[in-house]
Amino acid sequence: MLTFEKHNNMSTEDKNLHHGEPEIDELTQDRYLGGHEYDGIRELDNRMPRWWLYLFYVTIVFSAVYLIGYHVLPEGSRWASQEMEYENEIAAAALNMPADPHASIDLASLVPMTEQSDMAAGEEIYNKICVTCHGKFAEGLVGPNMTDPYWIHGDTTTNTITVKDLYNVMITGVIEKGMISYKDQLNPEQMQQVIGFIFSLQGTTPPNAKKPEGHKFDVIG
Amino acid sequence: MELQKFYYDNRIVKMFAYATLFWGIVGMLVGVLVAFQFIFPELNFNFAYTTFGRVRPVHTNAIIFAFVGNGIFTGYYYSLQRLLKTGMASKWMSYVHFWGWQFIIVLAAVTLLAGITSGKEYAELEWPIDILIALIWVIFGWNMMWTILKRRTRHIYVAIWFYIATFVTVAVLHIVNSIEIPWSLLKSYPVYAGVQDALVQWWYGHNAVAFFLTTPYLGLMYYFLPKAANRPVYSYKLSILHFWALIFLYIWAGPHHLLYQSIPNWAQSLGTVFSIMLIAPSWGGMINGLLTLRGAWDRVREDPVLKFFVVAVTAYGMATFEGPMLSLKSINAISHFTNWTIAHVHIGAMGWNGFLTFGMIYWLFPKMFKTKLYSIKLANLHFWIGTLAILFYSIPMYWAGWTEASMLKQFTEAGTLMYPNFLQVVDQIMPMYYMRAFGGTLYFLGAFLLVYNIYKTVKAGSFVAYEEAEAPALEKEGKRKSGEGYHRFLERKPITFMILSIVAILIGGIVEIVPTYLIKSNIPTISSVKPYTPLELHGRDIYIAEGCYNCHSQMIRPFRSETERYGEYSKAGEYVYDHPFQWGSKRTGPDLWRIGVKTGKNYKPDAWHYNHFMDPQKMNATSIMPAYPWLARYEIRLDQTAAKIRVMQTLGVPYPEGYDLIANDDLKAQAAKIAEGLRSQGIEISDNKQMIAIIAYLQRIGTDIVNGEPAAK
């Protein structure tokens, strides 16, 4: 155990400075240290609490084990570095990853969903994601206005814009204009819901509408 | 033995105490303002000087260096003289220290609000103020050591050990972390970049907590708690072991602020284990404090001073247990970048520092004014309001932190993020921000009761400016005597004591920082990482000036939940030109490191950034980001470009020779292109606005390794 001071024989200094002061604390029966008095503050000769010392020792042992486990053991039996941990996490996730729901979609089967519940779901998605760039009422902000009949990504051969066209925009994104792909965030059903909602806004005339961009197309939905 | 007569200078104590109260009120008021800015973005007032990014550093600096700083000096000037049985060695040094410190605080408030900042947390002040701080600190320390040498007591008490360790360590920390090269009268770049800057900064930042908020306050506790309780200190042996263990171990723990970030794994591990080993040494102080009250617990029920001390010491014990737990990687992965950290630091600041200061002030004023405290009842009321305030503050913030981590890390069964929009998390924790603001306001109101109580006490009392005392002179005593313990011997050798303290605190810092310079493998270089263009460099300085790092990180940790949200995790080699680093420590908003990556998940076009800066709520109705309309008005300071480039060259950033002279040509060309693009979107803006620069910067950060070759694994 650690000892810092010899107490078996009191030093001359202790005797000199200790005149008249009690050696034992009345309230706790602990022993005072002779000569330890600073502006009236005295110090007791108590041992360090055992549990405290053991706590200290345990943390030191923990630290040794920690450092050995992460850095000293031979490579291979060492605990994972953060880079390894990451690779393991990604590998584990890949094992459980369900198939991409967009991969098996038949584009021709896509329809805008117009049921009441689908419209509500579509509106919710719109307000969560699209609103940032297309505005609260789809009036256009950074992205184009989607309430007027002018569209950028329609089919110029048939002069129409369909669910399929908007679905493709959402799958691939329009990187140069700042629209990212949403294929990881929305499944085909959600995309059809939000497209249904967007098409339902045709002909509304929100305030601060952005000027038309693209061509005038017929909405087929 | 002949008694010598001398005087204790109470005037300096009183001045520091008034400054403590004054800055305490100011710092807390600013805290209340920033808390409400989370709820009402309008409270940023669309005005540069009152925006969160600038005001938050004023709050932290005011609480740490103005409120707690003056609190340290109040207790220190009172106790030092009495523990050494002498007046201060130099009166003028005491007063230069006082006025110098207050002047620094005023300069800090003005410059931070003006956007003049180094961008390093808790070390935001710029180079002229850094120099002034160093000077004033040395005057303070010189005066202290001189006073210690003039003492009439043979030994120095444990409180003074802590004062000495505080003096030398803060000096070392401040000077090393502030080595910077000025490029103008008020601005500079730090010599460290990226990983090194992060390590130095958090070595500093962590030890600002250790040696500014902890060791001096332990010193104060060792004096004021036994004095107020009139009880002996529980264990001298415990004092010795916990003191040396604390100062030696503390200095190593800095890297626990950088777990799972782009610093070497070995440095992180050192941060973790030294934090764990700190539990017992920290608790040594709590135990010695609480056990000193044995036999006096009945008085704790009646005496508000002791009540404040008991909660302070308990809060200290809680925070110093929580800290090491947060240093475990698995817990840190959850807590870091969230409001959990905010809760943790406020347990420390409100509980430990605040309550110890309040208790000390309630005890000191009646003593110095030879009277009784005006109202024990009011003090008790303050105690209860303050205690409730801490709970109202911290519980919602813990809750928020936990909520943030759970939501941000949650995946759907389809393997995508459950909450891909960061704002969903912000929306969820808004009620917690409300409650926090309430708790903070309560704490602030409590402090008013203190001020009122002290005002009435001062009015009723009569101040003793110079208190007479007498003691015999100290006889010289040389070598260690037989039977004298080694440490007991050291306690009468203050200079040796100081030197040993320096040695104890230098070891950890040297081991952790020097290898990042010497061993190349610690920061693998990436050849596609290139210096910022002059326009981007200007943008970076605007990012720093506006304090964006207070809410946004530039550090993607290697977790699936982060790479899925933000993109490829950050690599050490990406930051080699970042003087200073801007990794951040809290995500009130999302990480920005890969926001410019066009194929990434967060890419936004220039026009979006423009609109978002002008009116964030127009882009995201529930966003709590302030607006930055002045960025579209203020112009880029072309006259500063050359000086910035030259300093960067001095720091080793490979701009071609003579580039400083032509840098503005490149700047103008890049700016024209961005402004052209914005104008094509119907936005009216000229090429020379700050907006253009900050957009250029945001579109550049974190893109080099994506556009170039892939980073080395």
Image (cartoon, helix red, strand yellow):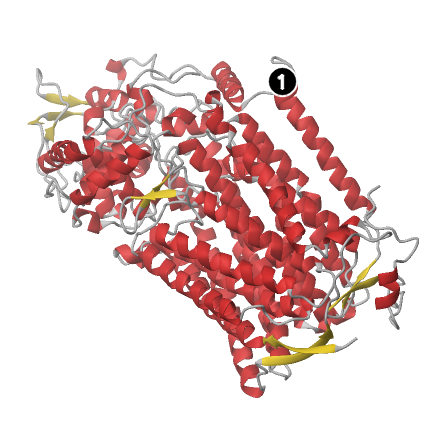
Spot occupied by residue A40 in the image (x, y as percentages of width and height): 75, 70
B522 with respect to B116 (left or right):
right
B66 with respect to B367 (left or right):
left
B658 vs A88, nearest the viewer:
B658
Mark 1 surroundings: few (<14), some (14-19) or many (≥20) residues within 10 A: few
A81 with respect to B694 (left or right):
right
- What residue does disc 1 label? A78
The quadrant the C terminus of chain B occupies is top left
Q: Quadrant of residue B280?
A: top right
Q: Is residue B364 visible?
A: yes
A17 with respect to B653 (left or right):
right
Q: Secondary structure at mark 1?
A: loop
A136 vs A55, nearest the viewer:
A55
* B304 in relation to B527, above or below: below
A132 vs B83, nearest the viewer:
B83
* B333 in relation to B301, above or below: above
At 69% across and 29% down in the image, what residue appears? A64
